[in-house]
Amino acid sequence: MIKKLNYSFVISLAFIFTACGSTENKSSSATALSFVEDNVTIEDNITNEENPTKLIAEPYFYQQWYLEKNEEFYTKNNIDENASIHFGTDYKYTGQGVTIAIIDDGLDTTHVELNNTIIATYDISTKTTNVAHSSMSGYHGTAVTGIIGAKDNTIGIKGIASNSQIIFLKHKEGMSDSETIELFNKAKELGADIINCSWGTYNVSESVKEVIQDLSIKGRDGKGIIIVFATGNDGQDMGNDESSIPEVIAVGSSDKENLRAWYSNYGDNIDVLAPGGDFDLGITTLDDTGENGIGTLSEDYLLANDENSFIGTSASAPIVTGTIALMLEKNPNLTRVEVENLLHNKSDKIGNLDYIDGFNEYYGYGKINVFKLLYSIGI
Amino acid sequence: MRYMFLLVLLTVHIYAIENFNTTVITYKINNITVGITNKIIIKLDNNQTINKYLNDFNLTKIKQIGKNLFLVKVSDNNQTLKVSNQLTQMEGVKYAHPDFIKKIIKR
């Protein structure tokens, strides 16, 4: 998350969120099953009665603006009509059969939205399975995990890959290179298909870089583990950051105006953008439960208009990670290179800058589009 | 990448960091602070074994952390930089660098 031109943070809004929680207002004008591309309406190319399409029925889905447009919420918050990743208002793919490792600062494993989702945990500091946040105000890892894995339970929010299996690996605040390597190796040992990293050091060592490259190339039985990094929130070149490793999927942030967010780091190795929010509109996700965490409008959620909302490339990275899980569910044989090529070729070229060969250093290959990605993947 | 640049660092602080059970020397490079203990990561070429380097540099092997990748320690952590730079120059060593401690920046 962002902290006034610095790293992570919590944002203060000038107003109190007053949106009605009524589910009657949560329909969206978009649908996942049809999409107009090149003036031709195309239909989802998969018919699978064992995996039917279901309507999203989560009470807070209407304010998950990063997933899909809700007419009323978009109008009220002046959101560009194309600011979402075009997730749709119904879903067929849930990341079933895909294992995602999340390396982050701690997790509330008791959150009802994560029931039966977490299959393994490990704390690098204590060498135990207890990955609870070290302080009562911890929230970051829970917020990241919620975007990916919140259950379809009609209780709160829609996790992008709600049936994926999640491995949670708790990092230290000050961590040695050998410990970083241990966490990546642990993710591999536990069977991760994708690894989400909503953090960085701006100073990756050769050994860590080499291990990440090795997993990206040789992991997943040679198909390559897909490792996703947030580019950072300092509005600067990514430099010698983990996200700059060419084999990594480097994710920057877009905002509600469907432009690159002002804080989003950039560079030659940025791959794609996904919504990351801004001071006036965050990314609705989970918070540590009860008195823990930082939410002020809900005990268990960080809502879009909370004065302590979740903002930054930390939020954008798990949006892409969850989307990749849907891609791997649809075709588990996709290699890391194929996933990267799909992300590059099927993202929307937003913004006012020119893309040269589909790329520019601020927007990468554009903002991801879930419908285009899933449509483009055959069985 | 060679790590000789570490010899021209601007500021040095010494203090103990919880959980590392050893003295940590911190260096600030371009406003990024890194910590160094008595541990070194060394990557060998395919045809090399670690024992030769353990003997030649009076190192203790802690564990293997990857293919041809080892975590070792020096007896005096004031020597960590010097030894890792010397190791880097050795034939049969792909690279060596201190087991840097870095701030993990949440985003």
Image (tube, grey):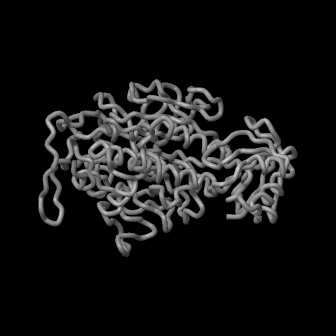
- Please state the horizontal and vertical placement of residue A368, each as a whole percent of the image: 33, 56
Q: Nearer the viewer, residue A340 or A258?
A: A340
Extreme front residue here? Answer: B47
Does the image show residue B14? no
Q: Residue at x 44, y 29 (%)?
A: A118
Q: Residue at x 32, y 66 (%)?
A: A349
Is residue B107 found left or right of A91 in the rendered image? right
Q: Nearer the viewer, residue A284 or A107?
A: A107
Does the image show residue A166? yes
Is residue A222 found left or right of A244 in the rendered image? left
Q: Nearer the viewer, residue B77 or A292?
A: B77
Rendered-image quadrant of the N terminus of chain B: bottom right
Q: Is residue A51 above or below residue A310?
A: above
Quarter assignment of residue B83? bottom right
- Please state the horizontal and vertical placement of residue B40, each as a whole percent of the image: 74, 49
Q: Is residue A143 above or below residue B34?
A: above
Q: Residue at x 38, y 73 (%)?
A: A353
* Number of marks in the rendered image: 0
- Please state the horizontal and vertical placement of residue A104, each as a whole percent of the image: 54, 40
- Please state the horizontal and vertical placement of residue A218, each as a whole percent of the image: 47, 50
